[in-house]
Amino acid sequence: NGEEVSNGISVKEDVNNEPNDKKENKQNAENTQEDLVKVTTKDKEHTQKSNVENKTKTQVETNNEVKKPLLDHPTVHIDVKRDPKIQVARLKLPILGEEQRIMELVNENEFLIVAGETGSGKTTQIPQFLYEAGYAERKMIAVTEPRRVATVAMSARVAYELGLTNKEVSYLMRFEGNVTKDTKIKFMTDGVLLKEIQTDFLLSKYSVVIIDEAHERSVYTDILLGLLSRIVPIRRKRGNPLRLIIMSATLRVEDFTENKRLFKEAPPLIKIDARQFPVTIHFNKHTYSDYLKEAYKKTVKIHTRLPEGGILIFVTGQQEVRYLVRKLKASFPYRKDVDYSKLITRKAANENDAALDSEPEDIDSDDDEVEKEMKRARKARRKAKLKAKALPKINLDDYDMPEDDGQADLVGSDDDSEGHLSDSDIEDDTLTPEIKSCRQPLWVLPLYSMLSSSKQARVFEPPPTGARLCVVSTDVAETSLTIPSIKYVVDTGKKKMRVYDHVTGASAWRVVWVSQAGAAQRAGRAGRTGAGHAYRLYSAPVFAHELPAHHAPDLCRRPADDIVLLMKCMSIDKVVNFPFPTAPDRMQLRLAEKRLQVLGILETPEKKENKRKDDEEVLKVTPLGKAVSAFPLLPRYGKMLALSHQQNLLPYTIALVSALTVPEVMSGKAECWPATGQTLLLGDPGVLLRAVGAAEYAHVKGEEELFCAKHGLREKAIKEIRKLRKQLTTEINLSVPGVDVKIDPEMKPPDENQARLLRQLVLSGLGDQVGRKIGLDEVKEGEDKRKYKYAYHCGELDEPVHLHSESILRKTIPEWVVYQELYETGAEERRKMVMRNVTAIEPEWLPVFVPQLCNLGEPLTDTEPRYDEKSGRVKCSFKGTFGKACWELPIVEID
Ligand code: CDP
Ligand code: MG
């Protein structure tokens, strides 16, 4: 095989995948030529170019510069017979006019950036261009998506347009996929490709990797870009080029093009101008906090007063979508048995009138009008009631509401667990005369990540005759999916963003302002098929002063421990030097590395003699670290789980870790959960554990709400803990052979022995956060005796710390403790540092669980190492110190 000759490396997949040996051998032989230029009679232009290239190359060599040789590229053309209907629709896409330019750039370059308005055809068309140009003949075309929705939807769409099945155009994501041995184009979530790199660093199965939606800057996408910027040149050196196409909306493309760490030379950039019609932006005069009510009111106004054209409403989450869909459907019902075609004529006439003055009336100016109208409506309703002529009751079952998909919400970006919206919010008094007199129905459709793909697909279809399309969506419609025929955008200005708790690593979805760039994207959705209008439900000053220009990429907002471990697991040793598109804080990365080292998740390298100062240590992942990385938790909690497997304590540890990873579970009142002995020493985590167990029992009995209220538990936190418990249990059962953990609704509190082991597990995860009681001789008269010193290995304050006022350990004030978190309370002079979630530990456990921070001297001679028959181990006593604080450890026994 020619390739073997050229670079001494045999790429097995190549040989095996090759059906046409003869032709291929010829090609490979050509590849062995130094300049990798393929000369084919079919491609005269390239023959000429290659000569030019050869010349420049020799010239360049004397200039001591490296000139890029022309790349090898496929020359076959795959005929695709498309349905004429599809072909017509494709030709309307702006990207079709650029096919030739794009393919020339792809053929001649390894890197290419395609920036284009959403809806210009990037995702659906570029994989097809590559397929037709033969890029899927020998290897596959990979397309990564940060969202699961897009992964499924787009693979189906591309298969359909190419007239192929999901056997050839397939998708793969965690827990789901339809890839076959015949797959040519493979859509996948970015996480999946990252996993593949771990087993096949050079991605030898692929000829092209397309990173789609790069502007979303998901953690995995960012890491992929950094990795691919290094993989691609290696593949070229091996004569087996890989192309990288970065596709992005027209947002912050500079992060990729002007990033010298990522690409030494800026890759060529193609901008696709979508046929974008002008969009008029209308700001609200006031910014009301009830943005859902505002969205409803605005939509009513648009529908009842403005000409034909679809409405797209942006809200923050699944529940809000469903709430608004119900409310709008109830206001403007569509009935299958009514003929709306007459209505259409009337509407069309209206539209002609409106077209004369293309600016719709300013519907912002009369918010008070609506209030008045509502008052009038209420009055009218009271009158009507008196006449015993109640409004016809609308039966919501008449409209096909999406059922609850019942999927775990942990993955989707529009998770919504605030259950504050209910049907009772659809009050009759919102049915103003204006609404009642409007006979045109609204065809209201929901759109969010967790919606089934068939239901999502409905937004792409035209509404039934006479009805106006209205899509209520989360930010998936911002850039991932484009809905045709939208003329009006209603933008609440809000979205849900994952906010990380740096202590627990827990992420919560918070409603935040979209960025100004995001708001612009949203507005742009109104100008796809004609001039449009965007109604922002916030004021211009709010836009200017409160909306950030951009949101920081996910990677810079996440706890660094996570990122460091993830990358180390992929053998990216020097995380601080990694070419991130936007680098996270170096200091944070280094601290995280240190922390992971202390926890035994990263190796501690042996101290080298005459080590140069700038010689950075490379800390590799330990076997424990590998096990820890399997859990979707901050490493310290993953460690507790990984170790408990050996101890057969899993149900308790799962519950405990779940409780520790959700912030603010209890609002004080530890007294409700009495404890003694080992359980008392397990401290606040023990209280949490028992609270979770009891809450589960109450939940099964249907009394959770009452229970939480009575015992000062935050109900939402308890629900979140339940979700996490389920998720971790499933994951462990799937991934650890022979383990089958069940969630016991009647979990008993741990017994003495279990509680002692749990204390050790807590120490194993929090071993870098140890406190020791300040000796009595160090406490001055009249001072609080419950003070501790702490040994935080990276960042030490010479200041005492205190037990949390609600800590159950105030009863015993143990000598040695670990804590989950330190925080500051009180103003200025009364300011003090407080430990939250404290567990008592025994000092002799420290050398076992936190050996990295222990300094043990020679074994003590007066206590000879001795064999312990019961445990079958040799025990030995030492005297030593712990941590930077250099506390003297008492004599400890180590097996
Ligand atoms: O990736 P980009 O945002 O540039 O565009 P795209 O997702 O490739 O969409 C191109 C066009 O295909 C849009 O006008 C979509 O509305 C349309 N499309 C569709 O009609 N049906 C689908 N299932 C997917 C896309
Ligand atoms: Mg796209």
Image (cartoon, rainbow, N blue to C red):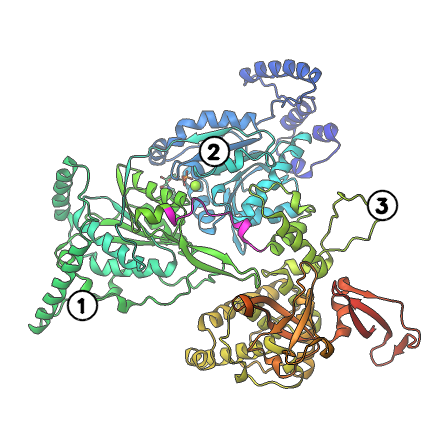
Q: Which mark is residue 53?
A: none
Q: Which residues are magenta?
A: 545-559
The three-letter code of the residue at mark 1 reads Lys
Q: Is mark 1 within 8 Å of ligand 1?
A: no
In this rendering, is residue 24 above or below 673?
above
Q: Specify the quadrant that holds the C terminus.
A: bottom right
Residue 679 location, x and y as percent? 64, 82
- Secondary structure, mark 1, is loop
The answer for how far apart the CA atoms under marks 1 and 2 are is 52 Å
Q: Is residue 546 magenta?
A: yes
- Which residue is tagged 2? 114
Residue picked out by circle 1:
393
Residue 606 visible here: yes
Q: Residue 781 occupies which quadrant of the picture? A: bottom right
In the rendered picture of this protein, how many numbered marks are placed on residues?
3
Q: Nearer the viewer, residue 413 or 552?
A: 552
**Residue 874: image location, x then y, percent:** 87, 74
Residue at left 59%, top 72%? 656
Going from the N terminus, do you reach mark 3 or mark 1 first? 1
Percent x, y of residue 152: 46, 49
Q: Amino acid at mark 3?
A: Asn
The answer to whether residue 544 is left or right of residue 226 is left
Q: Residues within 10 Å of mark 1 (few under 14, many from 20)?
A: few
Closer mark to the observer between disc 3 and disc 2: 3
Q: Amino acid at mark 2?
A: Val
Q: Nearer the viewer, mark 3 or mark 1?
A: 3
